Amino acid sequence: MNGRGSRATHDGVDSRAEILDAAERLISEHGFGSMRMASLIKVSGHSSSSIYWHFESKEGVLAAVLERAVDRFFERAALLRFPDDDDVRSRLEWFLRESMALTLQAPQFLRLFILQGLLRNDYDRGEAGVVGRVRAQALRNLTRGLAEALRPWGEEQAAEVAAAIVGPALMLFDGAFLDTQVRLGRIEDADARLLAAALTGMAVAARR
């Protein structure tokens, strides 16, 4: 590829990221339903033709914002290495702590996602489909993390139990995150131990 083509590609990547950064700020402040293309054009510094070239629609912007955020989170999560410990409760507590720490490093994604969930009555089908896809992706990745935490039980059983408890486990994670946002703090040690005990109880119940 010649230098001109390479530069054009680079500029396209930069402009897409700038549009997504602007959209993320606007959605965080006003919600997706109140985000106007005129505001996105002003904040991002890119024309409507550039925005539609990258994303085709307003719903496409929402999809890209959420999917970029969840990809970034799980890229970091994939680098986590579980401790060499055969105690399932200890492994679940470690997983919960580390996952929450990653979330609190860049909490905008989960804030956006929860906000969209709270505004679900305002969805059109396109928006609902975006949120559904992102949640499904989060569930798949959380299932893998839980299965790794439960690995001392054997890979097959760990996978089965993780799939069985992933729904309530996600409710627990979401609740813990909301608590940190209300208190403007982090998950406390005593709370982490109790939450891990709750996860362990779910896992043991599902294992029977």
Image: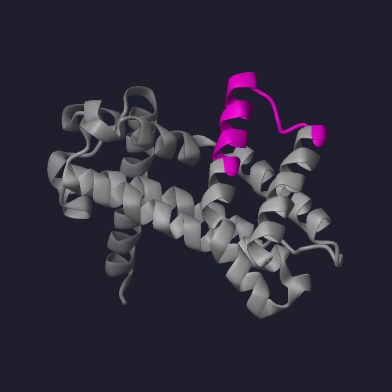
Taking the spot 71% from the left edge, 31% from the top edge, the residue there is 186
Q: In the picture shown, does residue 110 fall above or below 89?
A: above
Tell me the residue at 68%/78% (across/down): 155
Region rendered in magenta? 172-190
Q: Position of residue 148 (x, y in %)?
A: 68, 67
Left or right position of 124 against 166 = left
Instruction: Give the camera-side residue of 185 and 199.
Output: 199
**Quarter of the figure that contains the N terminus:** bottom left
Q: Is residue 136 magenta?
A: no
Q: Is residue 18 left or right of residue 126?
A: right
Point out residue 92 in the picture as x, y percentages from the top left corner.
74, 54
Q: Is residue 73 left or right of residue 99?
A: left
Give the number of callouts: 0
* Outermost left residue: 49
| Residue in view at x 28 percent, y 60 percent | 8
Identify the residue at the far front of this view: 208
Q: Quadrant of residue 192?
A: top right
Q: Is residue 138 above or below residue 37?
A: below
Establish if 30 lies above or below 205: above
* Residue 126 in sight from this viewpoint: yes
* Residue 174 on the magenta span: yes
Residue 53 picture location, percent across and down:
17, 53
Q: Is residue 97 visible?
A: no
When asked about the image quadrant of residue 198, the answer is top right
Q: Position of residue 117 (x, y in %)?
A: 36, 36
- At a point 26% along the width and 46% down the height, the residue shown is 128
Q: Nearer the viewer, residue 53 or 178?
A: 178
Q: Is residue 167 left or right of residue 95?
A: left
Q: Is residue 205 above or below residue 26?
A: below
Q: Main secondary structure of the magenta part?
A: helix
**Looking at the rendering, in which quadrant would you find the C terminus?**
bottom right
